[in-house]
Image (cartoon, rainbow, N blue to C red):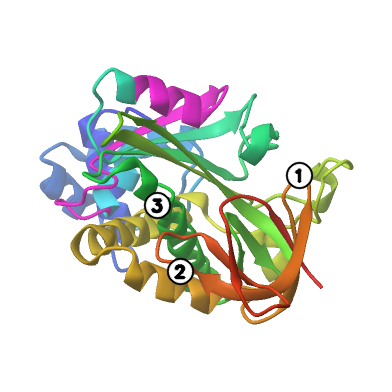
Amino acid sequence: MHRPKTTARLLMHLRNADGIISGEQLSRNLGVSRTAVWKQVSLLRSEGYRIDAVPSQGYYLSGEPDQLDNGFIRAELESDCIIGCKIVCTGETGSTNTDAFLLAEQGACEGTVLIADRQTRGKGRLGRYWVSPGGINLYCSVILRPCIPPFEAPQLTFISAVAVARAVKMTTGIQPEIKWPNDLLLNGRKFAGLLNEMSAETDRVSFVILGIGVNINMQAEQFPADLRTPATSLLLETGRPIMRQKFIVCLLKQLDAEYARFLQYGFAPVREEWEGYCNASGREVLVDLGATRLQGKFAGLDYDGALLLRMPDNRNERILSGDVTIL
């Protein structure tokens, strides 16, 4: 959202105030008259912000609309961050991954984040559809340009998974589980999915798009009846609504930290943390490969992120793609 600079600064002061802040103080801070302060307060109220006026004391920000504000999100991130260096929010689009791919082809900088309030053609893994109603969830895509060979690009999916898991734990207190390769679960139900897409040459990655979808405030009746797996949301699991912008800020901070760690230390630390969230570690699983199925014990991740399946003859089978079911 783009708003006048004075209005944006007023909102910042209201957010940072420890309780009530006087109109006189706001007038001094903004370098405008008290009447101008009142006009900016009225403008913010028209956008859905709840600003209480306390007689003879001042103003108090008592509530905010759950809308996407690129200015607020960017201001809450570190000034030197990679992921989130540029935030693009849109009300509706077909797919943030499709938009991000086009922007990356046009030269968009690494760390650019696209966030949509609603998607009409949301993408899931293996050509599946990601249900994307407006005003309640997170649909975002991140452009990365790592100096890595193409075979290492799938490792970035695990970075996304760890960042989402951390953000959920930090904002709700609930620890989620990760299902290989790209689903996140709460109480056995899926609430988030990841979809990475890549453009590469023979020996190097041109760019990778990290697609992240998180069901934040979705109600049970909003899920379609034909879902392949049981679904849930942070609201359904916690019993309380979650402010999307605060969750987005937390997620982008964690994603930036994980990406920096990956660039410095490689995949090993990411793999270790991912395995701590994995719901199948050491358990008997069935892996559906499409044309065939394999059964064995989930033995962790290989050096490149492939699933290691311990077979009955005690050898490890490497799985690069498939659907895992715990037995």
Dot 1 falls on a residue whose secondary structure is loop
Q: Residue 102 occupies which quadrant of the picture?
A: top left
Among the two numbered marks 3 and 1 on one chain, the one whose residue lies closer to the N terminus = 3
What is the magenta range?
A: 77-103
Q: Which mark is residue 290?
A: 1
Q: Which residue is located at x 61 percent, y 53 percent?
A: 192
- The residue under the point 28% across, 47% down is 83
- Near mark 2 (Cα within 10 A), the count class, few <14, some 14-19 or many ≥20, is many
Q: Is residue 119 above or below residue 307?
A: above
Frontmost of labels 3 and 1 is 1
Q: Is residue 53 visible?
A: no
* Label 1 crowd (10 A; few <14 / some 14-19 / many >=20): few
The residue sitting at 54% across, 73% down in the picture is: 300
In the image, which disc is placed on residue 166? 2
- The Cα atoms of the two marked residues, 3 and 2, are separated by 16 Å
Image coordinates of residue 203 in percent, x first then y, are 26, 36
Of 148 and 227, the residue lying toward us:
148
Q: Residue 48 placed where, x, y %?
A: 51, 39
* Disc 3 residue crowd, few under 14, some 14–19, many 20+, Cα 10 Å: many
